[in-house]
Amino acid sequence: MVVGEPSPQVVDQVFRALADSTRRDILRRCAVDEPSVSRLAQAYPMSFAAVQKHVATLERAGLVVKVRRGREQIVHTDTAAVEGARQALDELAATWRGRVERMSNLLATGGAE
Amino acid sequence: MTITSVETDYDNLTVTLIAHFDNPIDQVWELWSDPRKLELWWGPPGYPASVQKHDLRAGGEVTYSMTGPDGEQHRGIWRVASVDPPTSLQFTDAFADSHHAPLADAPTSNIAVRLVERDGGTRMELHMTFETREDMQQIVDTGTVDGLKHAINQMDSLLAP
């Protein structure tokens, strides 16, 4: 439990979005390139609509951004969101560091007796 | 110094914290097992905690709330996975709504506590990770985008004729 954490919902969406192998692969492609949705769709043995849905899940989690270029929808990664998962871990560590320090103070001063 | 190490493993998304207290193991255990003592350290400064339900048994629940500086309430719930006094405790900690039901969309963390008598005092190990409904290990494969680029560059050099 982290008080004041920006948005636990966002962190969870990131984790969920990354928990699918196709979406991880899409993210990988978008990290090195900026493919269009239709070019991405050609890379997977699934319908255009299915790929579009995966892209939408990644987009909701803030991991990719879609921009219109001419008639195409270009997808590229959002590095800040990927970094968010690491940040959440840092916050978890900081929260517990604080708790353990308070435990220590209580034990040292006999405040917990 | 009480905290002897804090390790954050970005590859496995875990945090391991090790601390040493000069106090006997039973006193350290009571900080977890006595709700009135738990209240004294759970909330950060400015967010006093109060523990409502405290059923520290496998399958039991601990519910708490913290009151923020503007009077706002932050609630949470533990779901206890296993308890073996005074040496181990495992639970998940989740944000909760006003009825202390876990929020579906909020991240849940798994916490494992282990206490060992050491040098006349107590060593406490905390192992924490975020719980996901699916394969966490796989998630981490993505790492940072820089990591991805690096991995893909390596693939490229392997594939180069």
Image (cartoon, coloured by chain):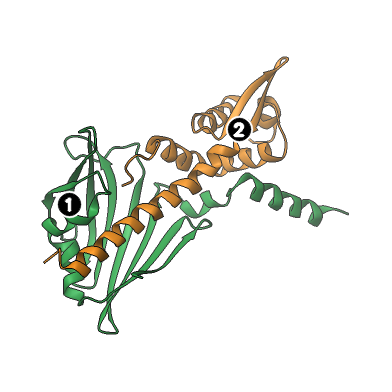
Chain colours: A orange, B green
Residue furthest top as drawn: A71
Give the residue type at disc 2.
Met
Nearer-the-camera pick, A7 or B60? A7
At which x and y percent is residue B92?
29, 53
Residue occupying the point 50% across, 42% down: A84
Give the residue type at disc 1.
Glu
Residue marked by disc 2: A46
At which x and y percent is residue B67?
20, 39
Q: How far is disc 1 from disc 2 in space, using C-alphas?
A: 43 Å
Nearer-the-camera pick, A103 or B93? A103
Query: As drawn, is B8 to the left or to the right of B29?
Result: right
Numbered circle sitting on residue B5: none
Query: As drawn, is B67 to the left or to the right of B104?
Result: left
Q: Nearer the viewer, mark 1 or mark 2?
A: 1
Residue A21 sits in quarter: top right
- Graded by Cα atoms within 10 Å as few (under 14), some (14 to 19) or many (20 or more), the crowding at tag 2 reads few
Residue marked by disc 1: B61
At which x and y percent is residue A110?
15, 68
